[in-house]
Amino acid sequence: MNRLSMHLRMFMATLWLAGVVPIALADEQVKHGEYVFKVAGCLACHTDTKEGAKPLAGGHALKTPFGVFYSPNVTPHPEHGIGRWTVEDFRVALREGVGADGRDYYPVFPYTSYTEMTDSDINALFAYMRTVKSEARPNQEHDIPWYMRWRFVNWVWKLLFFSEGPYENVADKSSSWNRGAYISRALAHCSECHSPRGLSGAIDQDLYLAGTVAGPDGTTVPNITPDKKTGIGNWEKLDLRAYLEYGEMPDGDYAGGLMAEVIDNGLSFMSTDDRSAVVEYLLSLPPIHRPELGSSE
């Protein structure tokens, strides 16, 4: 997309939000934004359900080897949320990992995946986020070592490990495969939980989606490459579609923990076509054998 086209899209999004463009078009954008919101799993991370907080008011504790990070309030509250943000502020946050205050985000926020989102999805998501209930909950300080509070550390981290830019279709793949890749890589940001990380916290791309023993809150996250012993190589397409829709595994058991929340609040709302596209993409990946995660049989 050229720069002129990008700015035109941003301008149109602003007009929609300002009420200049017909309401029907704005409603359509908000509806699409709600779909993006669900598939992207925003609710799970930005709601502190353990403390009984309101949806999207932040405070969800994310325990990592680098300390405990607390998700921010992303409701339209003008002081504690994103009520004063513009659509461009929102785009920069998702695409570049920089907040409206100009500070670089810690990569615990998955901008490293959201950077691949399209402008239309970003604009739609912003339009929807403007419609959710505003909550006046202040943001909580991260519980991290003193040296990580120097934000220039994030800037250096980006120079070393971050590649910015929207997803580009793979020319020799089908449209459904590319759609599945886009959802898996950008919106659903599967690799953020299903891939191991190095000492720097960057995702190990050589083990993309091959699972990790150091997932969220120290849990083991399964290998979702099509390895027959330690991954999903023995799953049929129908099995994987059922899992993404309502969490049922081939052995009759159901997803639990964080994955159950991700399915219930997000992936279960995917359209049939999108669900099939994700299945096509995942089953096409190179199988990676990970015996340290245990057998999937």
Image (cartoon, rainbow, N blue to C red):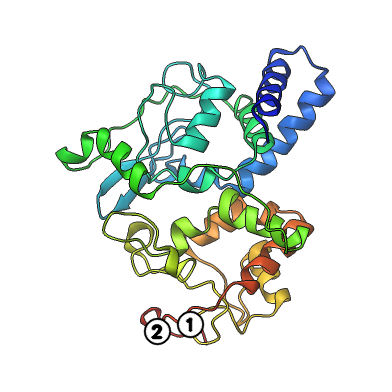
Q: Quadrant of the N terminus?
A: top right
Residue 230 numbered mark, or none: 1
Q: Nearer the viewer, residue 260 or 274?
A: 274
Q: Mark 2 or 1 closer to N-term?
A: 1
Q: Is residue 110 left or right of residue 127?
A: left
- Judging by the rendered image, the residue that carries numbered circle 2 is 291
The span from disc 2 to disc 1 (Cα, nearest Å) is 6 Å
Work out whether 75 lies above or below 83: below
- The residue closer to the viewer here, 176 or 126, is 176
Label 2 is placed on what type of residue?
Pro
Q: Quadrant of residue 255?
A: bottom right
Q: Position of residue 11 (x, y in %)?
A: 68, 19
Percent across and percent down for residue 291 are 40, 84
Q: Nearer the viewer, residue 247 or 221?
A: 221
Identify which residue is drawn at 30% across, 53% down: 64
Q: Quadrant of residue 205?
A: bottom left
Residue at point 79% right, 16% down? 21
